[in-house]
């Protein structure tokens, strides 16, 4: 249509140019006050028709549509987000280990000095740091910090709460500010639909145990021999490690009676097994919960463990 109009207007332009003006002697009314000769109208229309804006070039062939890649790109995006989340959790776990060792160093130095050959508590913390792959710089820096009289000591604090589905939560803290610790813990609990529990109302569902993370493969026979040589009367149990909680370097987990944790840890280290140990609360009767409540409880636990003052959070959920 555009090409046909262009040809027609070109013919009119040629006719208006070549023919004398008398062939266009009649006039065309444009406005009520003005009159314009048809010859002028033809020239004007031809000029407008020849302008670049009025010419519509024939349509060009469109490039073939590109093949959609939404599937692989979506998969790459999800994989990237999962890897980023895993890296963030790994970084958080390392930061918690370094913070935990730093606080334990301060407590040990405040109690018995900065010489590990005399201060057995400090020597044990340094061995634990080695087992957890915490750099020596972290230990050295916190020893110097602990010797400063302005550095506050850390207190072990325990808070209890009820999670979703009646699950019991035990929040273990190591803090130099009790008011800050209790305020932040209570805020996370209340904001996530949980309830703060009175002291002892949750802990009676748990039994205190000693837990050792060993960085070297260990079998039950070797463990029993080491425990007997250490003079332990209680039971010792061997369990597989939790890669996410214990780290990739963990090869075995040993559970002991709470009172015999130090003896078993010393015996293992004397036998060439680097290990880190601490007191834990083992549930007596795991609580069955729905999948929704389990997910909600783990969300609360993750938020609690992000707090600087929180060392660990224990629960009595029966995992599916």
Image (cartoon, grey):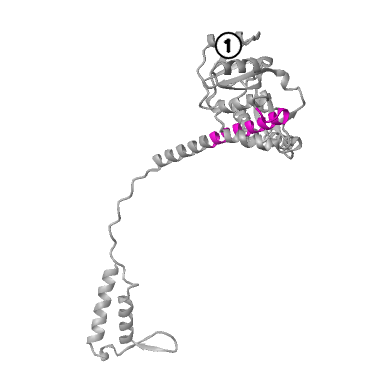
Instruction: Look at the picture and state if 143 lies above or below 3.
Output: above
The vertical placement of 124 against 18, above or below, is above
Residue nearest the observer in this picture, 158 or 40: 158
- Can you tell which quarter of the image residue 128 is in? top right
* Quarter occupied by residue 158: top right
Toward the left, the furthest residue is 18
**Rendered residue at 54%/33% (across/down):** 90
Q: Nearer the viewer, residue 256 or 269?
A: 269
Q: Residue 252 location, x and y as percent?
A: 54, 19
Magenta stretch holds residue 210: no
Horizontal side of 194 relative to 56 (left or right) equals: right
Q: Which residues are magenta?
A: 88-115
Disc 1 is placed on an element classified as helix
The residue where tag 1 is placed is: 226
Of residues 231 and 183, the one nearer the viewer is: 231
Q: Is residue 255 left or right of residue 248?
A: right
Q: Residues within 10 Å of mark 1 (few under 14, many from 20)?
A: some
Magenta region, mostly helix, strand or loop?
helix
Q: Residue at x 64, y 31 (%)?
A: 100
Where residue 89 sits in the image (x, y, percent)? 55, 34
- The quadrant of the image that shows the C terminus is top right
Any part of residue 160 in sight: no
Q: Quadrant of residue 8?
A: bottom left
Residue 105 in magenta stretch: yes
Against 155, residue 286 (above or below) is: above
């Amino acid at each position: 249509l555009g090409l046909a109009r262009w040809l027609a207007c070109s013919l009119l332009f040629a006719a208006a140019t070549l023919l004398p003006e008398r062939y266009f002697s009649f006039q065309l009314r444009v406005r009520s006050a003005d009159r314009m000769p048809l010859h002028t109208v033809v020239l004007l229309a031809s000029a407008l028709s020849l302008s670049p804006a009025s010419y519509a070039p024939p349509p060009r062939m469109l490039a073939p549509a590109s093949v959609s890649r939404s599937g692989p790109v979506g998969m790459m995006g999800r994989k990237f987000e999962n890897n980023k989340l895993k890296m963030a959790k790994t970084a958080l776990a390392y930061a918690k280990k370094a913070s935990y060792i730093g606080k334990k160093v301060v407590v040990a130095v405040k109690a018995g000095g900065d010489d590990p050959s005399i201060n057995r508590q400090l020597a044990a913390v340094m061995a634990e740091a080695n087992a957890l792959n915490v750099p020596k710089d972290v230990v050295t820096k916190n020893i110097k910090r602990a010797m400063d009289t302005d550095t506050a000591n850390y207190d072990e604090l325990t808070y209890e709460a009820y999670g979703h589905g009646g699950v019991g939560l035990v929040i273990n803290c190591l803090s130099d500010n009790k008011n800050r610790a209790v305020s932040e813990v209570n805020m996370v609990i209340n904001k996530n639909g949980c309830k703060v529990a009175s002291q002892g109302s949750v802990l009676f569902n748990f039994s205190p145990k000693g837990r050792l993370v060993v960085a070297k493969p260990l079998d039950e026979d070797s463990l029993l021999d080491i425990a007997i040589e250490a003079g332990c009367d209680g039971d010792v149990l061997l369990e597989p490690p939790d890669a996410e909680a214990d780290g990739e370097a963990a090869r075995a987990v040993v559970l002991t009676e709470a009172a015999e944790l130090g003896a078993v840890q010393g015996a293992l280290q004397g036998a060439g097994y680097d290990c880190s140990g601490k007191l834990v609360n083992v549930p007596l009767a795991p609580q069955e919960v729905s999948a929704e409540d389990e997910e909600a409880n783990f969300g609360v636990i993750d938020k609690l463990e992000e707090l600087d003052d929180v060392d660990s959070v224990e629960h009595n959920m029966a995992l599916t």
